[in-house]
Amino acid sequence: MHPIKGVDLLRGLKLKSSSATIRYVATCCNAMMYLGFDDSKHWVSMNRDRFHGDVPAVRMRICTGSVPDETSPTDLPCYRGYPMPLIGRLVLAGFVKFVGR
């Protein structure tokens, strides 16, 4: 990922030193921009509301294990972990990236 501008305003934060995730925050407005990983994941989790224009619809919520059942939204499928359709798409994307080298 290569931001167009404002990269000097991004700061990476870990909630715990042992965490494999880094939350990148814009220091100008304290807004979370995206989630990076220390491990070998080949994707970046972006916040949908950071995009403008014609953005794809949200299809599911993942990793909702810490959300109490009574407060969990019901407008989309919610998964406590990573559902198989998502895993399949990520594996395929990783394969395409590997083959394209």
Image (cartoon, rainbow, N blue to C red):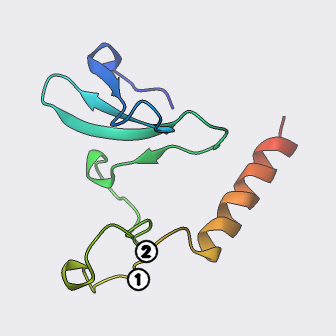
Do callouts 1 and 2 mark residues in contact (Cβ within 8 Å)? yes
Badge 1: residue crowd in 10 Å (few <14, some 14–19, many ≥20) = few
Please tell me whether mark 1 or mark 2 is closer to you in this view.
1
The relative height of residue 2 versus residue 37 in the rendered view (above or below) is above
Which residue is identified by label 1?
77
Q: Residue at x 64, y 75 (%)?
A: 84
Q: Determine the residue positioned at 24% across, 80% down.
A: 73
Dot placed on the residue nearer the N-terminal end, 1 or 2: 2
On-image quarter of the C terminus: top right
Residue highlighted by disc 2? 59
Q: Which mark is residue 31?
A: none
Q: Picture coordinates of residue 55 (x, y %)?
A: 37, 59
Left or right of 92? Residue 83 is: left
Q: Tag 1's secondary structure?
A: loop
Residue at left 48%, top 26%? 2
Residue in the foreground of this view, choosing between 56 and 39: 39
- State the image quarter where residue 30 is shown: top left
Q: Amino acid at mark 2?
A: Arg
